[in-house]
Amino acid sequence: MLLVSCGSKKQVYYANNNLSEKTIKPKPTKKNKITNKEVVYSSDPKIRYVQQFGAIAQDEMRRYKIPASITLAQGLLESQSGQGVLALKSNNHFGIKCKRNWNGRKVYHDDDAAGECFRAYKDPKDSYRDHSLFLVDRDRYASLFKLKKDDYKGWAKGLKKAGYATDPSYAEKLIRLIESLELWKFDNSKSTPKFKISNAPIHVVQKGDTLFGISKKYSISVAKIKKMNGLTSSEIQIGQRIRLEK
């Protein structure tokens, strides 16, 4: 496997080579019809990631025909919303390993095996560009470029089938990210989607959550939660972001 998700607790070692590049650590930073889709929450690391890299993903889409939604979803998943060890230490947002044709900076990271070689970049933008080239230059991904631009489901399933990741749920995870964060908007917009920012606290729905249980936990009535979030019923979905402003 060439690309993999990487845990944030594994050790990283840098290699000496003849390049003078320095890595730069990024600054830390439908059963219900939801009517307030323009509002996002700055406390959500996924949203911060999309805000930071959305325009870059669109630039890559225009140049290489890879849906921006797919690029963003892969970046979110592989980099752990920009907080994974490879993203922070080496600006590698897609878990691309060195392989024989890589002559740039390297970083060693315990993954499927101890001390595996991964690519390191001067800037996260370089990781996004390398990700595009990685897909474009390999025959096993060629069929994906025949799909419609907005067929993110086809892309997600095709990436898994082509061996991008060993996780059996990889395609489903990408699709879930795209739909829960509405990343498909980046595929169909000539400009980068803009959102109103709210600092209101949120609750991300987990398995077993109910709207009644959330209302009790945060001492907010069910009726108010439904009104704030534009919900037409009490049904909620895993991964849904519930606004909790009192």
Image (cartoon, rainbow, N blue to C red):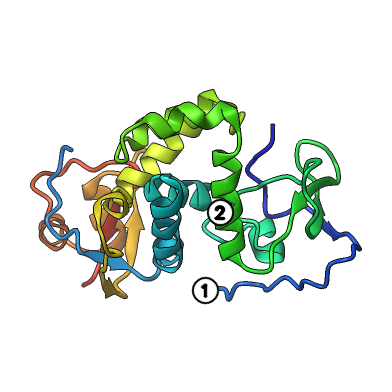
At label 1, counting other C-alpha atoms closer than 10 Å, the crowd grade (few under 14, some 14-19, many 20 or more) is few
Furthest residue to the top?
161
Above or below for 170 versus 197: above
| Residue 139 at x, y percent in the picture | 58, 28
| Residue 197 at x, y percent in the picture | 28, 73
> Is residue 124 in view?
yes
**Horizontal placement of 181 versus 11: left or right?**
left
Q: Quadrant of the N terminus?
A: top right
**Horizontal placement of 246 versus 51: left or right?**
left
Q: Are marks 2 and 1 in contact (CB under 8 Å)?
A: no
| Residue 90 at x, y percent in the picture | 71, 62
Above or below for 145 versus 219: above
Question: What residue lies at 56% left-to-right and 54% top-to-bottom?
Answer: 80
Nearest the viewer among 162 and 13 is 162
Question: What residue lies at 29% left-to-right and 63% top-to-bottom?
Answer: 218
Nearest the viewer among 126 and 244 is 126
Q: Quadrant of the C terminus?
A: bottom left
Q: Give the residue type that dot 1 points to.
A: Thr
Real-space Cα distance between discs 2 and 1? 13 Å
> Is residue 50 in view?
no
| Residue 54 at x, y percent in the picture | 40, 61
Residue 103, numbered circle: none
Q: Which one is earlier in the sequence, the residue at label 2 or at label 1?
A: 1
- Name the residue tied to disc 1: 29
- Name the residue tied to disc 2: 80
